[in-house]
């Protein structure tokens, strides 16, 4: 017997009901982005590997899916290249392209490539899949969708404020209670300076960013393995465990970072965002979290992460300010800030909390039964009218027994069924059955359209 086919680990199939729910997520986010003046673009699934490599740090580079060159991909590779045992170097010879790791780096490439066509500041959103060669686990997939919004060409912190308003609005529409966490990479740089490890900022942020996942002791052990001194780790402890209100944390950190110009600038930036949003009145909690690091190397200012309060799952939205990203593609001096909604994790949260509107699961609203060619011909004009009125409907394609057609309607959770036989055709009427209550009503075509549309 032939082996049952499967799909790669970390990927998923989505049936019709699942796609209806996912489209609800995409449409909700898309509508909010549009309200804030963002324009949609798309970029290719694969980019030149030179575009992707070196933008996500060593850990990110390891998670890139690389695509073998077509044809004789071993051409030009010598035994010496293989004997070097340098996987990354060999990969650059075998692979010229890779699947995108996120949407931000391809967006930076897009901005540089199309700079003459764009009006700055440029506000774009993008809803597309990305791929990471990560270890699959709950809430973590190898193929998943991101829903990004970015503003490039503006240094204003009002952009950060508006992005947090977008986050708040989206999750309010979904009915998901969240905590929006904020920090600033300048604060983290200042911390690295005052503990005497300024040159280890990348190692420190990568380790701290894992605090929720691996715990404090394992973070400290990773810091030790990266060569951070015991004294520096000791000084770090009260900072990353700092508690209190946002105002209290800011005041404490102003004192701690009093000798760090960079750190104080980060404090000022966060304070502006927090104060402005406080006056605007977000519906969800906003928390200064000094352990938030966002491991990606390109962040330079405010950084954000969103956690669901009622479900145990990783962050469901993240983002931050990146002042230097376009510079690596030959366009220095262009600042940007963005957020990314993790659609797949939001999907899982909505499923666990059962927060989808009932209408989302229903595709066909009305099923017309089919008891023969004459009855079907009688129904077709009304089907066209209903569809033109925005009512999703279908006719059972085969002349089959009533039981079979009703089973079909129940399986698809169709709320209404239209029954047409000789009696209905003689009276120029239709029998409308409410599948939830079982109630049947004899109505004219106009009445049926008025009721359903």
Image (cartoon, rainbow, N blue to C red):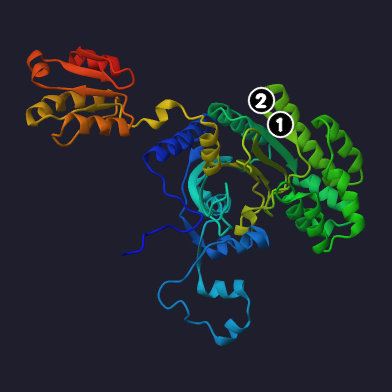
Q: Mark 2 points at which residue?
A: 282
On the question of residue 100 being in view, the answer is yes
Mark 2: few/some/many CA within 10 Å (<14, 14-19, 20+)? some
In depth, the one of 58 and 190 nearer the eye is 58
Percent coordinates x, y for residue 90 in the rendering: 57, 75
Question: Where is the C terminus found, in terms of image quarters?
Answer: top left
Residue drawn at 65 percent across, 38 percent down: 306
Left or right of 442, for residue 95: right
Picture layout, residue 406 above or below residue 87: above
In depth, the one of 243 and 44 nearer the eye is 243
Between residues 88 and 229, which one lies in front from this camera angle? 229
Compared to residue 427, the image places residue 336 above or below, namely below
| Residue 286: mark | 1
In the rendered view, tell whether residue 263 sits above or below residue 112: above
Provide residue 61's location: percent of width, then percent of height.
62, 62
* Quadrant holding the N terminus: bottom left
Classify mark 1: helix, strand or loop. strand
Which residue is farthest bottom? 79
Q: What element carries label 2?
A: loop
């Amino acid at each position: 017997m032939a082996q049952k086919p499967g799909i790669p680990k970390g990927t998923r199939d989505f049936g019709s009901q699942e796609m209806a729910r996912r489209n609800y997520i995409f449409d909700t986010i898309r509508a909010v982005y549009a309200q804030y003046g963002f324009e949609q673009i798309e970029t290719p699934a694969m980019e030149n590997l030179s575009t992707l490599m070196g933008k996500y740090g060593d850990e990110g580079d390891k998670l890139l899916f690389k695509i073998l060159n077509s044809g004789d991909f071993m051409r030009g590779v010598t035994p010496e290249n293989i004997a070097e045992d340098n996987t990354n170097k060999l990969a650059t010879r075998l692979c010229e392209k890779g699947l995108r790791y996120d949407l931000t780096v391809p967006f930076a490439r897009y901005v540089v490539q199309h700079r003459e066509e764009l009006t700055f500041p440029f506000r774009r959103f993008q809803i597309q899949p990305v791929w990471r060669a990560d270890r699959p686990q709950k809430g973590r997939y190898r193929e998943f969708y991101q829903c990004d919004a970015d503003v490039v060409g503006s240094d204003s912190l009002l952009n950060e404020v508006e992005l947090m308003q977008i986050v708040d609005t989206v999750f309010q529409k979904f009915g998901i209670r969240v905590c929006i966490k904020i920090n600033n990479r300048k604060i983290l740089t200042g911390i690295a300076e005052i503990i005497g490890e300024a040159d280890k900022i990348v190692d420190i942020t990568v380790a701290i960013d894992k605090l929720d996942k691996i715990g404090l002791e394992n973070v400290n052990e990773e810091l030790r393995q990266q060569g951070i001194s015991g004294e520096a780790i000791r000084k770090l402890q009260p900072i990353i465990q700092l508690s209190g209100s946002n105002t209290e944390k800011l005041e404490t950190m102003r004192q701690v970072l009093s000798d760090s110009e960079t750190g104080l600038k980060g404090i000022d930036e966060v304070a502006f965002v927090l104060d402005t949003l406080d006056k605007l009145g977000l519906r969800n909690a906003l928390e200064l979290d000094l352990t938030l690091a966002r491991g990606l190397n390109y962040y330079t200012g405010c950084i954000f992460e969103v956690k669901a309060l009622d479900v145990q799952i990783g962050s469901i939205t993240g983002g931050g300010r990146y002042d230097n990203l376009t510079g690596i593609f030959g366009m220095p001096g262009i600042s940007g800030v963005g957020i990314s909604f993790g659609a797949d994790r939001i999907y899982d949260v909505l499923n666990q909390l059962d927060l989808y509107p009932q209408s989302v699961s229903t595709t066909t609203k009305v099923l017309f039964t089919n008891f023969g060619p004459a009855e079907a011909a009688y129904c077709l004009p009304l089907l066209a009218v209903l569809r033109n009125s925005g009512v999703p409907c279908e006719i059972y394609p085969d002349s089959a027994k009533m039981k079979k057609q009703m089973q079909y309607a129940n399986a698809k959770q169709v709320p209404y069924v239209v029954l047409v036989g000789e009696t209905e055709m003689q009276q120029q009427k239709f029998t409308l059955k409410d599948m939830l209550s079982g109630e049947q009503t004899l109505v004219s075509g106009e009445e049926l359209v008025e009721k359903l549309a």
